[in-house]
Image: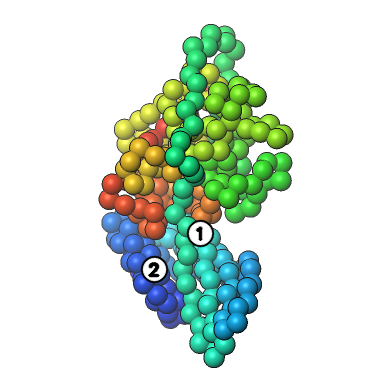
Amino acid sequence: MGEITAYWQDFFRQNKADQDWWHKKKTLCKKREAQILKIRGKGIVLSKRSYDTSRNTGYAVHLEYLMKQGDFFYTEEQIVPYQLLKKSNGEGRHQYIEKPPAENTGNQLPVLKQENIKQSKRQIEYNRLEAVKYAERWWNSFNPEYRRFEDDCTNYISQCLRAGGGPMWGEPVRERGWWYGKDSWSFSWSVAHSFRWYLNGSERGIRGVEVEQPEELNPGDVICYDFEGDDRWNHTTIVVAKDADNMPLVNAHTNNSRNRYWSYEDSAAWTPEIQYKFFRIEIS
């Protein structure tokens, strides 16, 4: 694993959740024949709450990993949420609280209306470079021109595709098309499940051409995740680079991350039943 300082070794051993996460990280590195050469991190306090006998401080750790895979070096970044629980007697412990990505609330999932649309003769080219530049610019912050969602992953990906020239259509019907307005937006813009099915069936604007293997994707393409394998799609990422084995590295929001390995096997949300959809993005 390279030279990991004693501080970070101790940090990741704070509790079982940390140990599980760090074990997953090391296992994934071994599987990829990759090494973590160095870890750098800094904490950002998010909230403070005091109780009669304890104090709870919420904070995020911005971790940067220097990764080596063969002769290929790159930096992976991740924002990891923690809380410090400190009792009045001075005892304290750090607790890892990664939130599994989950966007679909309630019992009903939005169903999009797919329509036969006469194709325009005007061809629009998807600008992958601009989509990736946007993904890099906003991976750990929020564009004030758009609403920020508690579960923000698909909203962020939609913004990336919009930056790449994806044309919006369907306003004001939320079940129709892919669009964002001042006070409203389509389900496909912000909900992972709806976005996955929109890409799969779209015949206008942005559309996803499904491919079988992740190595067939290029920067600017999209991966959709069903963590539990129950056909309720939870999460969306955008490919921003490829590793030494030609496998995707992705950016994402909700648990903000950059250059993360596409499979998410180091995530608290990962299960053996996970399903993926790999979409090559086009505009028609």
Q: Nearer the viewer, residue 128 or 277?
A: 277
Residue 223 is situated, as x and y percent measured from the top left of the image, at 42, 39
Q: From this viewpoint, is residue 28 visible?
A: yes
Residue 183 is situated, as x and y percent measured from the top left of the image, at 70, 35
Left or right of 151, for residue 264: left
Which numbered tag is attached to residue 17? 2
Left or right of 270, for residue 55: right
> How many marks overall?
2
Asked if residue 139 is positioned above or below residue 164 in the image, the reply reads below
Q: Nearer the viewer, residue 8 or 58?
A: 58
Residue 79 is situated, as x and y percent measured from the top left of the image, at 53, 60
Q: CA distance from mark 2 to mark 1?
A: 17 Å
Q: Amino acid at mark 2?
A: Ala
The residue shown at (47%, 72%) is 95
Q: Amino acid at mark 1?
A: Gln
Which numbered tag is attached to residue 233? none
Q: Which of label 2 and label 1 is nearer to you?
A: 2
Q: Nearer the viewer, residue 49 or 6?
A: 49
Which numbered tag is attached to residue 78? 1
Callout 1 crowding tier (Cα within 10 Å): few <14, some 14–19, many ≥20: many
- Find numbered disc 2 in the image and state the secondary structure of the residue it sits on: helix
The residue shown at (45%, 76%) is 11
Asked if residue 256 is positioned above or below residue 210 in the image, the reply reads below
Residue 10 is situated, as x and y percent measured from the top left of the image, at 42, 79
Left or right of 67, for residue 204: right
Asked if residue 48 is positioned above or below residue 201 in the image, the reply reads below
Asked if residue 266 is positioned above or below residue 56 in the image, the reply reads above
Q: From this viewpoint, is residue 4 visible?
A: no
Mark 2 and mark 1 lie on one chain; the one further toward the N terminus is: 2
- Find numbered disc 1 in the image and state the secondary structure of the residue it sits on: strand
Quarter occupied by the N terminus? bottom left
Q: Quadrant of residue 196?
A: top left
